[in-house]
Amino acid sequence: MIEWLWPWIMLAAPLPLLLRWAWSTRERGQAALSVPSLQTFSDASSSSKVEHRGHFWRLGLIWVVWSLLLIAAARPQWTGDPITLPTSGRDLMLAVDISGSMATEDMEIQGRLIDRLTVVKSVVSSFVEARVGDRIGLILFGTNAYLQAPLTFDLTSVNRLLIEAPVGIAGGKTAIGDAIGLAVKRLRLRPHEEKIVILLTDGANNVGEVEPEKAAELAAYDKIKIYTIGVGADEMRMPSLFGSLSRITNPSADLDEETLTRVAQVTGGRYFRARDTNTLAQIYAVIDELEPIDQDPETFRPVQALYYWPLAAALILFSILLGFDIRARYEH
């Protein structure tokens, strides 16, 4: 159906008549103090019927233009039938570490070493695409934690925000506690009993205002389940200073698995260790098997603006009227 956002604007319809009446009253007042001209009466009496019809036609066209402008200003819009959004799914907040250490190239894809964040983006993007019907939010954290996307059904936007995130933009350190606290803040007001946080990191909490364990207790109080994922290889071969020799290092030496495990256990979740790309994909497949929850149906009505139709018609008619006036002036 058609609805009007500002229907009260139609009250301005008689405004031209009021202005015309005020102007004519002013002219009559001036004429009472002046000597009438006989030539004026002579010119008026010599007006032809054709000119009278032309004046009437022009006046009618002006009124049509004015009416169309008022209709456009009243903002008509077409409201469609209600569309029901999916009524089942999960409230799921993704917290992804994008600190500087995520640039470490110790993950392998097709025999080629790739940095951790690129692999995470690939796996998590596939995970998000399969969550049709779920509300998903995205938090990116480093030295600080930032909400990139609130809980939404728009999975495409969540995916795009994740893929476009550069490593290190949130700072070089790791604020795991702040990331959990921000996720709890966004989920605690949700009315459903099962609310989930999936936190992925490759380090330890070394900055921030909230300790991970304290944030986990707050999550448990609000019945928010946290699944933690530690990412990074256990071994990495590094070239030595002498060229021919190499040494093996542990690129995940800073990963605090103990804290991540406690955080998951306190909230009833699980801790996973992803040492390679395949393991990371399997972890998200396991998490994907969580039972869905029922949510209240949400509906919306598609709205299409219609104001540009009467506005375009008014501009066309005014152009025609202006063209006739210019032509008449040149003919005379």
Image (spheres, grey):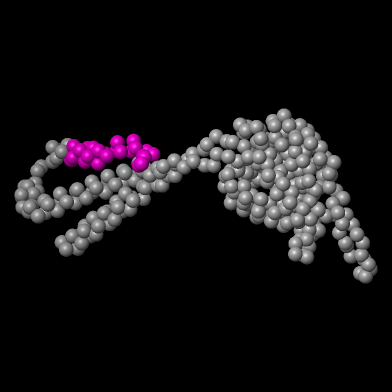
Residue 316 x/y as whole percent = 29, 55
Does any portion of residue 144 appear in the rendered image?
A: no
285 to the left or right of 84: right
47, 144: nearer the viewer: 144
> Measuring 80% from the left and 41% from the top, which residue is drawn there?
260
Segment tinted magenta in the rendering? 1-27
Is 235 left, or right, of 306 in this rendering? right
Point 81% across, 40% down: residue: 261
Q: Is residue 217 magenta?
A: no
Dividing the picture into quadrants, the one containing residue 194 is top right
Residue at the image position 57 percent from the left and 36 percent from the top: 295
**Image x and y of residue 258, in percent:** 85, 41
Q: How far across and how far down the image is residue 114, in percent?
A: 76, 61
Comparing 174 with 36, the one in front is: 174
Quadrant of the frame with the N terminus: top left
Which residue does the image show at 62% across and 33% down from the upper left? Answer: 192
Secondary structure character of the magenta stretch overall: helix
Image side of residue 30 versus residue 166, left or right: left
Is any part of residue 108 visible from this angle? Answer: yes
Residue 4 in the magenta stretch? The answer is yes
Name the spot of residue 289 as percent of width and height, x first. 68, 44
